[in-house]
Image (tube, helix red, strand yellow):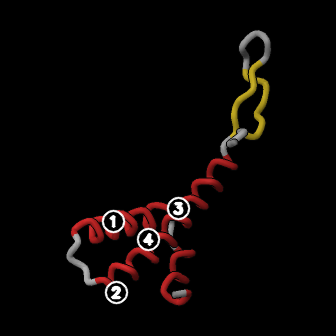
Amino acid sequence: MAAATSDIDKLSFEEALAQLEKIVSQLESGEAPLERSIELYERGTALKAHCEARLKAAEAKVEKITLSAGGEPVGTEPLDVE
């Protein structure tokens, strides 16, 4: 399975999400044989984790603007994502 998911690290968030949506659609159709469904589920799990990690990294980069008492922007500070 590691070889099947090693390419996931190279995907952008949008590419991984598109693949994940396709997998969900295939699984929801119920037409895939059991073994293929298991493979799809495992890849979907890896894609979901990749998307979550990419989102977490993006959130960490977002900064919120700090304002003075008069409402003027005075700087930025890291966004508290928790």
The kind of secondary structure element at disc 2 is helix
Secondary structure beneath dot 4 equals: helix
Q: Residue at x 55, y 66 (%)?
A: 50
Residue 29: x and y in percent read: 22, 68
Q: Residue 51 carries which label?
A: 3
Query: In terms of depth relative to the viewer, which is nearer, 14 or 50?
Result: 50
Q: Is residue 73 above or below residue 28?
A: above
In 3D space, how far apart are the residues under numbered discs 4 and 3 (Cα atoms)? 10 Å
In the image, taking residue 40 as reference, residue 4 lies left or right, namely right
Q: Mark 1 points at which residue?
A: 24
Crowdedness near tag 2: few (<14), some (14–19) or many (≥20) residues, C-alpha within 10 Å: few
Q: Is residue 67 left or right of residue 35?
A: right
Decide which of tag 4 and tag 3 comes sooner along the chain.
4
4 or 66: nearer the viewer = 4
Instruction: Say which of marks 3 and 1 sits in front.
Output: 1
Q: Under tag 3, what secondary structure? A: helix
Q: How far apart are marks 3 and 1 (CA)?
A: 14 Å
Residue type at numbered disc 1: Val
Q: In which quarter of the image is residue 34?
A: bottom left
Q: In which quarter of the image is the C terminus?
A: top right
> Which mark, residue 44?
4
Say which label, 1 or 2, has the lower sequence index. Answer: 1
The label on residue 35 is 2
> Answer yes or no: do the residues labelled 1 and 4 have beta carbons within 8 Å?
yes
Report the amino acid beneath label 3.
Cys
For residue 49, above or below residue 74? below
